[in-house]
Amino acid sequence: MNTLTDAQRDRILALLREGKTLRRIEAETGHRRETIAAYGRRAGLLGESTVVRLDDVRPVTLAPTPARGTQMRAA
């Protein structure tokens, strides 16, 4: 099994701590996103899903839509 050296692992973890994205780290280091994510999860820096964090999601406010067959009145 291929593993990263200590220096490579430390660099990846440092970049994750800086808030770099998996794609950015992949481009800078040449290591696959899956490998970076695995090391990040083992270090406790990433959760199971790195795609969306609930803290980053903004609530969506939808405007009411008129019922079918009715016309909107001009204000």
Image: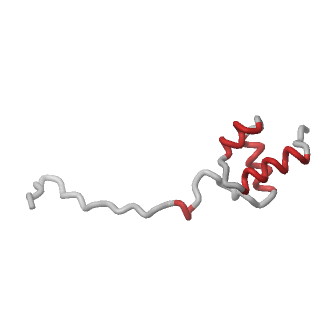
Residue 10 in percent (x, y) is at 84, 51
Residue 31 in percent (x, y) is at 77, 38
Q: In which quarter of the image is the N terminus?
A: top right
Residue 37 in percent (x, y) is at 73, 48
**Left or right of residue 74, residue 29 in this image:** right
**Left or right of residue 31, residue 1 in this image:** right
Q: Which corner quadrant of the image does residue 73 belong to?
A: bottom left
Q: Residue at 76%, 55% (x, y): give it.
A: 41
Q: Residue at 76%, 46% (x, y): give it.
A: 36
The residue nearer to you, when weighing 19 against 70, is 19
Q: How many labels does the image show?
A: 0
Residue 35 in percent (x, y) is at 77, 43
The residue nearer to you, when weighing 68 against 55, is 55
The residue nearer to you, when weighing 7 against 46, is 7
Snapshot colouring:
secondary structure
Q: Residue at 73%, 43% (x, y): give it.
A: 34
The residue nearer to you, when weighing 7 against 69, is 7
Residue 59, above or below 51: below
Q: Residue at 32%, 60% (x, y): give it.
A: 62
Q: Which corner quadrant of the image does residue 75 belong to?
A: bottom left
**Left or right of residue 61, residue 7 in this image:** right
